Image (cartoon, rainbow, N blue to C red):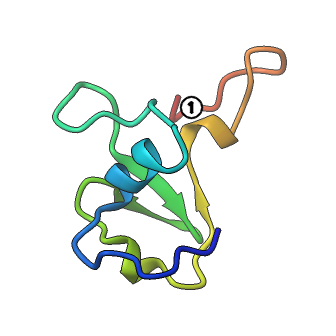
Amino acid sequence: VVEKNADPETTLLAYLRRKCILTSEEEGGMRSHSLGLIHFSANACLAPICSLHHVAVTTVEGIGSTKSRLHPVQ
């Protein structure tokens, strides 16, 4: 995904919800805010999208499935 003129104050959580329409991540809820970012996790409600240049982000939608088996983080 290429985001031109990204607002430096936009968090990954806000971006995922608004632009990618992914809603599994909740701010202040019981669900995990941790997302896999190149072999380390980050808090989506704290990570600014501008800090993720050339970083592959994997959300809980991108791992496991109900057909094969849910991933432990799900």
Does 14 sit left or right of 28 as displayed? right
Does 22 sit left or right of 44 as displayed? right
The residue most toward the left is 28
The residue most toward the front is 5
Does 12 sit left or right of 19 as displayed? left
Q: Is residue 3 above or below residue 17?
A: below
**Label 1 environment density (alpha carbons within 10 Å; few <14, some 14–19, many ≥20):** few
Q: Secondary structure at mark 1?
A: loop
Q: Amino acid at mark 1?
A: Pro
| Number of marks | 1
Residue at image coords 39%, 76%: 6
Which image quarter is the N terminus in?
A: bottom right
Does 39 sit left or right of 28 as displayed? right
Comparing 40 with 28, the one in front is: 28
> Which residue is label 1 attached to?
72
Comparing 32 with 72, the one in front is: 32
Position in image of residue 72 (x %, y %): 56, 31
Q: Is residue 29 above or below residue 50?
A: above
Residue at image coords 59%, 71%: 38
Comparing 16 with 32, the one in front is: 16
The residue most toward the top is 67
Position in image of residue 26 (x %, y %): 30, 33
Position in image of residue 51 (x %, y %): 38, 82
Residue at image coords 49%, 50%: 19
Q: Quadrant of residue 11?
A: bottom left
